[in-house]
Image (cartoon, rainbow, N blue to C red):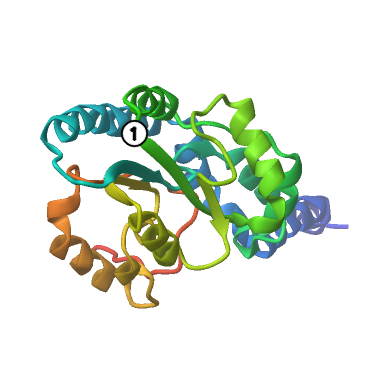
Amino acid sequence: MTKKIAALLLSLPLISTVSLAAGNDDACKVKENAIALSYQQQSAEVTALQLQTYAFATERFKQIMQADKSAKKMAVVLDLDETVIDNSPLLVRDMNNCHDYTSWDTWSDWEQKGHPTLIPGAKAFLDYVNSQNVNIFYVSDRLQTNKAETLNSLKALNLPQVSSDNVLLYTDTKEKRRASIRENYHIVMLFGDTLADFDAIFKNKKSTKYQRHLVQQQAEHLGKDWFVLPNASYGSWMKAPLTAWDE
């Protein structure tokens, strides 16, 4: 046996291992989201952005309290997931199991048994709003069938104004649920991690370029009555093509 053949035979297990690993990576597309989940869950920058958003919102809320002359009672409306509560452990678990968490087929189990944590800054802001006797509504697309479990999760986090009437889960579009609140309240602030949490015009299947154009059109709301929380974990942008440098 020549030295070249011997060397080739010795290298076969290594080649097989590398090939298998490459094959596994190809089969596990969801692991492409690892850097996004790392940023969302572990980065100090996301924590800073979350705290910053709620700090700005608190100052803006104080201004609104002084200036609002509406005959209706005021209300603050917030999304829940990735806005008030953090569900990233579920997403990481699914990714580690090579399961596409954007199929949402594990979400119901998480709603029933999971233990979400608070988004930094959210509770301090909500406690302040509550101290001013302003109504708080949580508008979320969590499942209505899991409402009891969601209420228990929110109560365990000691969030204010958690009740069946104030937590509006998925029964109809968020726009219609917001409209039902507006029948009796003046919504002075909206919070969310996706733009559809603010206006139904963003609930479309058009390009991210078009979405960014809509943001420019609605820019006057940002920091005034719309407050957007960062979410790199999931969103309608996930399948958008990226732009590379072309020399």
**Looking at the image, which is closer to me, 244 or 195?**
195
Q: Is residue 104 left or right of residue 72?
A: right
The residue positioned farthest toward the right in the image shown: 1
Residue that badge 1 annotates: 134
Q: Residue at x 51, y 35 (%)?
A: 41
The quadrant where residue 142 appears? bottom right
Q: Residue at x 27, y 26 (%)?
A: 55
Which image quadrant: the C terminus? bottom left
Q: Is residue 27 above or below residue 185?
A: below
Q: Is residue 173 left or right of residue 48?
A: right
The quadrant where residue 114 appears? top right
Q: Is residue 201 above or below residue 153?
A: below
**Looking at the image, which is closer to me, 112 or 101?**
112
Q: Is residue 44 above or below residue 198?
A: above
Q: Is residue 186 visible?
A: yes
Q: Residue at x 31, y 63 (%)?
A: 199
Residue 245, position as x, y percentages in the image: 24, 63
Element type at marker 1?
loop
**Looking at the image, which is closer to me, 105 or 161?**
161
Residue 117, position as x, y percentages in the image: 57, 30
Q: What crowding class fits label 1: few (fewer than 14 Cα within 10 Å), some (14-19), or many (20 or more)?
A: some
Q: Is residue 117 above or below residue 181?
A: above
Q: Amino acid at mark 1?
A: Val
Residue 39, position as x, y percentages in the image: 45, 38
Q: Residue at x 45, y 48 (%)?
A: 79
